[in-house]
Amino acid sequence: MARRYHGSKWDSKREAILKRDEYKCRHCKRYGKVKAATMVHHVKPVDQRPDLYLESRNLISLCGTCHNMMHDRDSDALTATGLEWVQRIWGEE
């Protein structure tokens, strides 16, 4: 099931996160690459933690390729890469 985020609060937060991350993919940056970020990813998924929907700490800028690496697109569960970001940001799995 595809998620869709709507509304001015999300639009403003999304833009603020992209700006914070200088419109660059944070996952690519870890590996010395520079790629434009086009997505904002919820490190802890909204369906598990809706209270973190607009929490800046829970949001990272990603390119489309890296965003697809964070989720198993069949089950929408976090992949090992997605879980690594949970550990990196929140210190837990």
Image: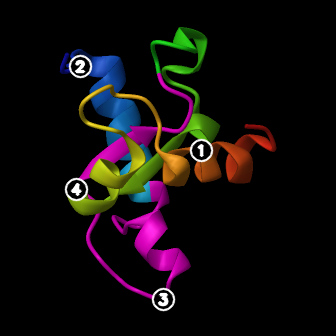
Determine which residue is flagged by label 1.
Answer: 83
Please provide percent x and percent y for residue 18.
Answer: 37, 53
In the rendered image, the quadrant that contains the N terminus is: top left
Q: Position of residue 45 (x, y in %)?
A: 48, 25
Q: Using the numbered discs, state the Cα–Cα distance from disc 2 to disc 4 in whole angstroms.
A: 15 Å
The residue that disc 4 covers is 64
Q: CA distance from mark 1 to mark 4?
A: 18 Å
Which of the two discs, 1 and 4, labels the residue nearer the N terminus? 4
- Under circle 1, the secondary element is helix
Q: Main secondary structure of the magenta part?
A: loop
Return the residue at label 2. Answer: 3
- Label 1 neighbourhood size at 10 Å, few (<14), some (14-19), many (20+)? some
The tag earlier along the polypeptide, 2 or 4, is 2
Residue segment shown in magenta? 20-45
Q: Position of residue 3 (x, y in %)?
A: 23, 19
Residue at position x 58%, y 28% in the image: 55
Q: Earlier in the sequence, mark 1 or mark 3?
A: 3
Q: Which mark is residue 32?
A: 3
Q: Amino acid at mark 4?
A: Gly
Identify which amino acid the numbered label 3 is placed on: Gly
* Label 4, label 3: how far apart the Cα atoms are: 17 Å
Relative horizontal placement of residue 89, taking residue 80 as reference (left or right): right
Separation of marks 1 and 3 at Cα, in angstroms: 21 Å
Residue 92 located left or right of residue 46? right
Along the polypeptide, which appears first: circle 4 or circle 3? 3
Disc 2 residue type (three-letter): Arg
Q: Please give the name of the residue rendered at 41% of the width and 67% of the height, measured from the top-left corner.
A: 22
In the structure shown, which secondary structural element does the residue marked by tag 2 occupy?
Answer: loop
